[in-house]
Image (spheres, grey):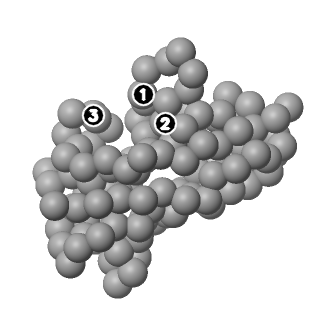
Amino acid sequence: QVQLAESGGGLVRAGDSLRLSCAASGRTFSSYAMGWFRQAPGKEREFVAAISLTGGGTSYSDSVKDRFTISRDNAKNTVFLQMNSLKPEDTAVYYCAASRWTYSSRASQYDYWGQGTQVTVSS
């Protein structure tokens, strides 16, 4: 069992940066691939980024590629999402998730989810 807690969200202006963190409980964090997803009001949850167990592999959605960076610190049981050049369309609740399988873009591949953190980008 893994419990996840996101932090770092907030209200920023277009062009600003934010760094989200997701702290995981338990001693098996390094056994899970991790992902970030987001959900905007009235829209379905969408994939943002994912990272492999060791951090050697990453993937991004086209909408955030070259702006966002996912990373992890297995010693601190934490995964990060560095978000640069934020746009109003990045406004959403951001969720981190843990997968026992692979760093997939498919939400169904993830076993555990956090409660989410709100990111609001004003124009």
Q: Position of residue 97 (x, y in %)?
A: 33, 49
The structure residue drawn at horizontal position 35% and vertical position 59%, both measured from the top left corner, is: 4
Q: Position of residue 25 (x, y in %)?
A: 29, 70
Q: Earlier in the sequence, mark 2 or mark 1?
A: 2
Q: In which quadrant of the rendered image does the C terminus lie? A: top right
Image quadrant assignment for residue 2: bottom left
Check disc 3 and report the residue beneath it: 106
Q: Which three-letter amino acid code belongs to the residue tagged 1?
A: Arg
Please tell me the numbered disc located at residue 31: none
Residue found farthest to the top: 42
Residue found farthest to the bottom: 75
The structure residue drawn at horizontal position 75% and vertical position 38%, both measured from the top left corner, is: 121
Crowd tier of the residue under label 1, counting other residues whose Cα lies within 10 Å: few below 14, some 14–19, many 20 or above: some
Q: Which three-letter amino acid code belongs to the residue tagged 3?
A: Arg
Considering the numbered disc 1 on the image, is that residue within a helix, a strand or a loop?
loop
Crowd tier of the residue under label 3, counting other residues whose Cα lies within 10 Å: few below 14, some 14–19, many 20 or above: few
Disc 2 and disc 1 in contact, CB within 8 angstroms: yes
Check disc 2 and report the residue beneath it: 38
Considering the numbered disc 2 on the image, is that residue within a helix, a strand or a loop?
strand
Q: Position of residue 117 (x, y in %)?
A: 54, 47
Report the Cα–Cα distance between label 3 and label 2: 12 Å
